[in-house]
Image (cartoon, rainbow, N blue to C red):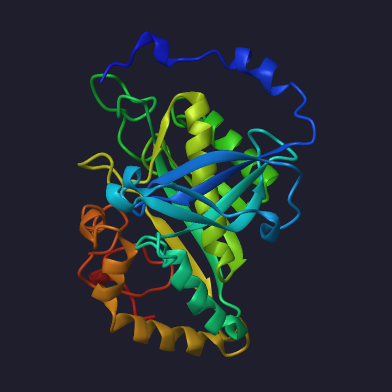
Amino acid sequence: MATSLSSKLNKAVKQQYMELPQGEKVQAMYIWVDGSGEGLRCKTRTLDSEPKSVEDLPEWNFDGSSTYQSEGSNSDMYLIPAAMFRDPFRKDPNKLVLCEVLKYNRKPAETNLRHTCKKIMSMVDSRQPWFGMEQEYTLLGVDGHPFGWPSNGFPGPQGPYYCGVGADKAYGRDVVEAHYRACLYAGVQICGTNAEVMPAQWEFQVGPCEGINMGDHLWVARFILHRVCEDFGVVATFDPKPIPGNWNGAGCHTNFSTKEMREDGGLKVIEDSIERLSKRHMYHIRAYDPKGGLDNARRLTGHHETSNIDEFSAGVANRGPASESPAP
């Protein structure tokens, strides 16, 4: 898909306006997950002074009929501030505000999974659940073609790209560096990044975070990535298998532990937990994926460092399918 020549704006021209003083006012960008369960939306309001905590932020509303979240006949939805970060694009004192979404009747929207997650996390806070997330993504041009790939063909086969260095191995590092620094500025608990197996594929890691903070930091890190890509004129996709064929897919891998798992004798607690997980495998597969597992089925084939989506497996440092996995 070709884009209009007018689609590219001069960032240097914008900068002269961004350097203007803003007085005592503060811009707060409210961010929420839309009705797809994957897409992010945002809009900005002016505050009279800098908020010191989430409690200082006012509720807001939006038109849910334009975000797959309501019908046009009763479309007002409420934005409830849940977590606040520094804004790396407008800089201090401006804020990014991650919100929960309520329907017109003040009940949680269907894609407001934070609401139920927070309830569960509050029930198990004595267990001190720690999470670390490894989010893989692929950079694309606005035409949907992988960034840096030949226009009419493919790059060399996988092998030299994972943690690679050099213009012929690392495609789009400028985006990665900008995203990393923006996350640090915002206060996101980003803890690392690396080039992934497929060219133009990267990963960032968030954590360790405890409880509900994990979801807040991961979603804001995703938002910042999309926003950085917007400035560079590229697109980040979290699609599990953006390129069919002999290319690795992209996932979001979860590292998890509780207080008992981190203490002496924790290995037994881990093994018991794995046994319980094995009995709920397909239920969890459906829960991981907004499309009920259909998207991940394209990636979890037993090839390209994945397990088969239909089989539960456990192992130590094992990235192969179930038939190759040793006992935990």
One can see residue 61 in this view: yes
Quarter of the figure with residue 108: bottom left
Q: Measuring from the top left, give residue 245's x and y in whole percent.
A: 20, 42
- Give 75 or 302, whichever is nearer the viewer: 75
| Left or right of residue 75: residue 93 | right
Residue shown at 42%/54% (left/top)?
Answer: 77
Q: Is residue 273 above or below residue 321?
A: below
Quarter of the figure with residue 104: bottom left
Q: Measuring from the top left, give residue 133's x and y in whole percent.
A: 50, 59
Q: Which residue lies furthest to the top in this view?
A: 5
One can see residue 196 in this view: no
- Give 73 or 216, whichever is nearer the viewer: 73
Residue shown at 26%/71% (left/top)?
Answer: 322
Q: In this view, does 247 lie above or below 117?
A: above
Residue shown at 42%/85% (left/top)?
Answer: 273
- Give 87 or 280, whichever is nearer the viewer: 87
How many discs appear? 0
Quarter of the figure with residue 49: top right
- Identify the image quadrant of the C terminus: bottom left
Q: Measuring from the top left, give residue 233's x and y in whole percent.
A: 45, 24
Residue shown at 27%/64% (left/top)?
Answer: 307
Q: Residue furthest front?
A: 73
Q: Measuring from the top left, give residue 60's x and y in whole percent.
A: 54, 50
- Identify the image quadrant of the N terminus: top left
